[in-house]
């Protein structure tokens, strides 16, 4: 039995290496870890944007500081407005509004946010830029995490365009 407890990108790198060792595929584990690390190392470091990342609706739920999503956001210059919380807290519409995010990220999973939800979120935080994001890129640890920096860059461009437009 092999167990993991992943809360950061660094935890993912360690897990990839560990899996390589326990399966007798150390080179592959190191290669995958290097691929993920390299993707994050190549990510631009723009000025931070205060962001809320929503994972559920009815009730609204977000991510706390002890999650992989929080760490991925931070590495991409997205400052989690609910970073003072843990795990996956429920928040009210009022708490979301009071947090005053510059951006709201609506994840594709576990709740399948879609275009039809944008207007509802705009009513809660009218000044925020809003983006639909690939939840897998932000939360699926392992080799797939190498896709996160490209998704973060796409989201950052979209948010910047929305704030400018």
Image: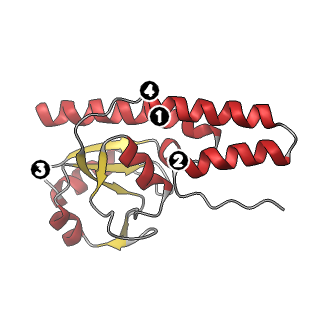
Query: Disc 3 and disc 1: Cα gap in Å?
Result: 29 Å
User: Could you tell which of marks 2 and 1 lies nearer the N-terminus?
Assistant: 2
- Give the label, 3 or 1, closer to the camera: 1
Name the side, left or right, on which 151 lies relative to 6: left
**Cα distance, mark 2 to mark 1?**
9 Å
Q: Which residue is mark 3?
A: 127
Q: Residue at x 33, y 48 (%)?
A: 105
In this figure, which residue is indicated by the disc labeled 4? 42
Asked whether the residues under the numbered discs 3 and 1 touch, taking CB atoms below 8 Å apart as contact, a structural biologist would say no
Q: At 73% across and 37% down in the image, what residue appears? A: 29
Give me the disc on residue 124. Answer: none
User: Which part of the image, by quadrant, shows the C terminus?
Assistant: top left
Asked if labels 1 and 4 touch by Cβ distance under 8 angstroms, the answer is yes
Front-most of 40 and 88?
A: 40
Q: Are marks 2 and 1 in contact (CB under 8 Å)?
A: yes
Q: What residue would you read off at disc 1?
A: 40
Marks 4 and 3, how far apart in space?
A: 30 Å
**According to the image, label 2 marks what residue?**
9
Q: Secondary structure at mark 1?
A: helix
Q: Residue at x 18, y 61 (%)?
A: 124
Marks 4/1: CA–CA distance: 5 Å
The first of marks 3 and 2 along the sequence is 2
Mark 3 or 2, which is nearer the eye? 2
Q: Counting residues from the N terminus, which is met first, the one under dot 3 or under dot 1? A: 1
């Amino acid at each position: 039995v092999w167990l993991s407890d992943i809360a950061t990108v660094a935890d993912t790198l360690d897990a990839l290496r560990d899996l390589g060792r326990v399966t007798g595929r150390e080179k592959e584990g190191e290669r995958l870890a290097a691929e993920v690390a390299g993707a994050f190392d190549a990510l631009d470091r723009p000025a931070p944007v205060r962001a809320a990342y929503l994972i559920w609706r009815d009730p609204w739920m977000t991510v706390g500081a002890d999650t992989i999503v929080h760490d991925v956001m931070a590495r991409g210059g997205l400052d989690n407005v609910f970073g003072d919380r843990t795990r996956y807290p429920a928040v009210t519409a009022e708490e979301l509004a009071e947090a005053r995010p510059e951006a709201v990220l609506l994840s594709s999973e576990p709740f399948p946010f879609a275009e039809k939800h944008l207007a509802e979120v705009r009513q809660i935080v009218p000044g925020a830029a809003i983006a639909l994001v690939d939840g897998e890129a932000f939360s699926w640890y392992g080799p797939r995490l190498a896709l996160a920096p490209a998704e973060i860059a796409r989201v950052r461009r979209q948010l910047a365009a929305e704030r400018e437009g």
